[in-house]
């Protein structure tokens, strides 16, 4: 059976880009059509990325204490979220954290700091870290995410060995000022442009679940396409207590898969990364989402914990994918399940509470 989503995938593969109406139709697909959406978007994923999954690892170089007021962020001015707060890691600490991620299977390290943007001294600090990490791990790809850039800073980071720069547009221009007031959408676009002009690969994405409309999600995706973002992290709002978005729950697992699929249809050949909120919002549909997206973060996020890194790698292998840059999965069936089945010691026949 050929579905309208299949036809859309065929037409995209024939070189006809998705329209805004196509994107809206994907977002508004009935949940009963979810597998059709995934199958069609999966054709595009396989065309451009085969069965590879890019594995990224976050190192939070400086956490919390931010003067900006991004309403969704646990590190923002005014946030009372109970998160880790610390000033800059030193170079040895950054190397140790990056090494852990690389040993765990990541090929890209994302070096992130809170704040409006780096001073030139901060850029030098990060340049030193990058030099040290690359000396130890020559094949690593490094993405820096330090906030709004000033003239010359992207070039300095590039010269230090940085490969990519992340700065998310986060949401549609038409929705931006409702989610943050201390900087503008234009500020964000300007930094993506500075990174690209310096020859860095642009990594820019969005956050879903911020009260945006379907049309605004589509607007944001088309903006990212037109900005030339090479990697598009799709974050799902994690509504931290102590932030203006606490108790905001707009997303279902099926909705999240449709958002990722919409991103794939609009930007078929770009890296679509399932970013923060993957475990919380996709839950048991994480595997399905991998048939659409081609990139994830390994382990923990900036201020929240992800599932075990081993579970991330198992998710990839169990679904027939391979980590980009690694050899074909050498794991025999059953590897990783090295423990005996857990013996039941609760419920019927015991005095312990049943697992129900
Ligand atoms: S998103 Fe970045 S700039 Fe905005 S509050 Fe959080 S750390 Fe600060």
Image (spheres, rainbow, N blue to C red):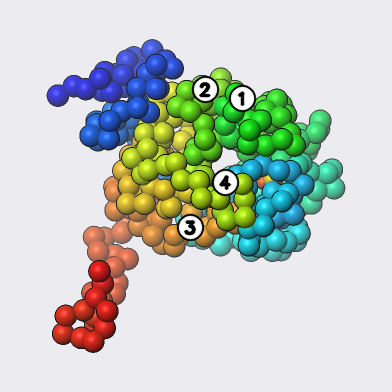
Label 3 vs label 2, nearer the camera: 2
Residue 168's quadrant in the figure? top right
Above or below, comparing residue 30 to residue 323 in the picture: above
- In the picture, the disc for residue 245 is 4
Q: Earlier in the sequence, mark 4 or mark 2?
A: 2
Residue 37's quadrant in the figure? top left
- In the picture, the disc for residue 219 is 2
Whether the residues at callouts 3 and 1 have beta carbons within 8 Å, the answer is no
Q: Which residue is mark 3?
A: 306
- The answer to whether residue 59 is visible is no
Residue ID at (32%, 47%): 285
Q: Earlier in the sequence, mark 4 or mark 1?
A: 1
Q: Earlier in the sequence, mark 3 or mark 1?
A: 1
Q: Which residue is mark 1?
A: 173
Distance in Å between CA atoms under marks 4 and 2: 22 Å
Q: Earlier in the sequence, mark 1 or mark 2?
A: 1
């Amino acid at each position: 059976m050929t579905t309208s989503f299949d036809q859309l995938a065929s037409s995209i593969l024939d070189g006809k880009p998705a329209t805004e109406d196509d994107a809206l139709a994907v977002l508004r697909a009935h949940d009963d059509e979810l597998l059709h959406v995934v199958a069609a978007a999966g054709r595009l994923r396989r065309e451009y990325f085969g069965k590879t999954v890019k594995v990224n690892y976050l190192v939070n170089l400086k956490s919390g204490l931010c003067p900006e007021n991004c309403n969704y962020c646990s590190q923002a001015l005014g946030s009372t979220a109970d998160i880790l707060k610390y000033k800059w890691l030193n170079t040895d600490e950054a190397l140790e954290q990056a090494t852990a991620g690389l040993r765990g299977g990541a090929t890209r390290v994302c070096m992130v700091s809170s704040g409006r943007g780096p001073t030139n001294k901060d850029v030098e600090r990060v340049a030193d870290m990058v030099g040290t990490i690359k000396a130890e791990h020559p094949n690593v790809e490094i993405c820096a995410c330090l906030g709004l850039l000033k003239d010359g800073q992207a070039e300095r980071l590039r010269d230090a060995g940085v490969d990519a720069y992340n700065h998310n547009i986060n949401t549609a221009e038409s929705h931006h000022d409702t989610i943050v007031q201390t900087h503008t959408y234009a500020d964000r676009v300007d930094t993506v442009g500075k990174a690209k002009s310096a020859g860095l690969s642009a990594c820019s994405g969005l956050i879903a679940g911020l009260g945006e409309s379907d049309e605004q999600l589509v607007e944001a995706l088309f903006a990212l396409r037109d900005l030339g973002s090479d990697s598009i992290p799709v974050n799902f709002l994690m509504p931290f207590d102590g932030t203006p978005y606490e108790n905001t729950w707009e997303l279902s697992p099926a909705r999240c898969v449709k958002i990722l699929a919409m991103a794939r249809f609009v930007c078929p050949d770009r890296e679509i990364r399932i970013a923060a909120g993957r475990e919380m919002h996709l839950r048991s549909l994480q595997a399905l989402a991998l048939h659409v997206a081609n990139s994830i973060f390994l382990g923990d996020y900036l201020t929240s914990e992800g599932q075990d890194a081993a579970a991330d790698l198992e998710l990839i292998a169990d679904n027939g994918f391979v980590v980009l840059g690694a050899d074909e999965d050498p794991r025999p069936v059953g590897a990783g399940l090295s423990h005996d089945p857990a013996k039941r010691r609760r419920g019927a026949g015991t005095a312990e509470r049943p697992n129900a």
